[in-house]
Image (spheres, helix red, strand yellow):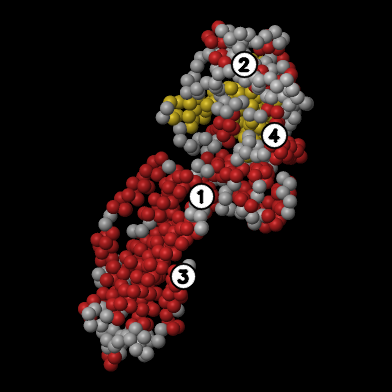
Amino acid sequence: MTSPRRARPVLEVVDLMTRFHTEQGVVHAVNGVSFSLTEGESMAIVGESGSGKSVTALSIMGLLVRTAGAECRGRALLDGRDLLALRPRELARVRGKEIAMIFQDPVTSLNPVLTVGRQLGEAVLHHAGASRAEARGRSVELLDLVGIPNARGRLSEYPHQFSGGQRQRIMIAMALALGPRVLIADEPTTALDVTIQAQVVELIGSLRQRLGMAVLWITHDLGLVAGLVDTVLVMYAGRIVERAAVRDLFERPLHPYTKGLLQAVPAWNDTRGGRLRTIDGRPPDLRSAPKHCAFAPRCPHALDRCWAERPPLQEADGGRASACWRWRELEGAALAREPRP
Amino acid sequence: MASAVGFVVVTALCMAAPLIAPYEFDAIDLGSIRQAPSWDHPMGTDDLGRDLFTRMLYGGRVSLTIGLLSAVLGTAMGALVGAVAGFYGRWTDNVLMRFTDMAYSIPTLPLLIVLSAYTQAAVVAMVVIIGLLSWMATARVVRSEVLSLKEQEFVLAARSLGATNRHLIVRHILPNAVGPIIVGATLAVGNAIVIESSLSFLGLGIQPPIPTWGNMLMDSQATMATKPWLTVFPGVAILLVVLAVNFVGDGLHDALDPKVRKR
């Protein structure tokens, strides 16, 4: 767990806000997210469904702008260049080459009517201006890299001839084709079998080290990536509520939401057969933008202040940050589980 | 399948007309006019003693050329308009689709008559005119396909890897819509042949002496009762070819649509 001292940020997100204008009103999906990813760093954004973690990733990639009703504000600086301000053509040039993304479902993420070789070679062909033969050679290399046996022979096969895990490997290979410096992995294993999940996660982890790129994991399964990330950002209702090195987070969460999340993970060695702890209540409706702490309605430790004023993300000790008024008390573990008012 | 074979055979025969035709298509033989089918003239001869079989072959060449080329033109236009409208959505979609509706609402035959009066009724002109009047159905079908295809995850994935819009449309979306496009194209072939025949029948298509199935039909109407072969052969040819093309279209639809399972 070396704290990243190479502190040169490769991706810097500043006050990112994403809203969707829908017929039912404005959905505040991301409300001022800031973080920075240093070169070669491995970071995870964790949160439950609807916390805005995927939307954050899509916003950074500029993949939302075109769809109807999406509005992104703020900045996403990749090497100082604001991705959100780029024109479509420039953005297309950056995507794939400098920042790439892999998606949840490998089954639908590959074009069913194009051969795998063609899809793999595409990026090389168009971005790097390679010849067909070069693109083919690179495709073979890439398939080898992600551990698909008999790569050369399988280039002419179609996606449906591969298993789910293999398809995700192909997606990874496609994302890595041009050696991007940042890879965003948006729940890359949700659609896979548990046994395959670990393999795919490890593959990405080992490729990160070999290729020296920064990886931003988007996940709701903290346990899956715990061993592979340096820093964790916890998101709730479109905001970062806690930032910490992964070990610190597990040992002493500084936000009640994180604490709840960790308690909700079933322990494998729990033999007492007790009930699984859950966080009461439901995630807030993002159509309203409350002035209070978004977690207050579900928080066992909420004070009057939490209802009056939203806590900002405050820097805490050890490079951590928490968006809770009572983080110091949490740090001292002085907060017992209080009865709900 | 049989339709496909039949269509290919007929097309091949017509395209090879100069090689297999027993006579010149405009060789007038006044000594043997209006003869019934015989060994010398397998389909008989017309008013000017021209061999009908020869004229059928040459006529088919013109009719099929017009049918195929205008179908290709119409389909290409339709696919382009539909893809652009569906992909970009919003006002692009609105403008293009209202334009399509407008093109649809123009009565075809009167327009064709007017247009062919201004053009020289050459093959090229016929192809362009028929093509320009038959892209709307394809445009609508392709648009609706694209509307659903563009929301597919693989489009997002390709975009995240730096694909431009043009690249997405040409390389990722259209290949997925190729089923309906091909089906539309085959149906358009039949349609174009019928339109060409109707125009020729009205005397507005390709002008004599160049034969087409349509103008052969027209030439024969005066003698329909007494010399039926002059009417029957071109009529049946049009019927069979159009029918075959439509069957091929149906067959392709079933073969290319994964939702229609073979029993």
Structural distance between the alpha carbons of marks 1 and 4: 31 Å
Chain-order first, disc 2 or disc 4: 4
Q: Is residue A305 left or right of residue A148?
A: left
Residue at the disc numbered 1: B173
Residue at the disc numbered 4: A214
Which circle, 1 or 4, is nearer the viewer? 1
Please provide percent x and percent y for residue B139: 40, 52
**Label 2 is placed on what type of residue?**
Ala
Same chain for mark 1 and mark 2? The answer is: no
Check disc 4 and report its element: helix, strand or loop: strand
Structural distance between the alpha carbons of marks 3 and 1: 31 Å
Check disc 1 and report its element: helix, strand or loop: helix
Structural distance between the alpha carbons of marks 3 and 2: 73 Å
Q: Nearer the viewer, residue A133 or B19?
A: B19
Whether the residues at callouts 2 and 4 have beta carbons within 8 Å, the answer is no
Please provide percent x and percent y for residue B132: 35, 59
Q: Is residue A138 above or below residue B55?
A: above
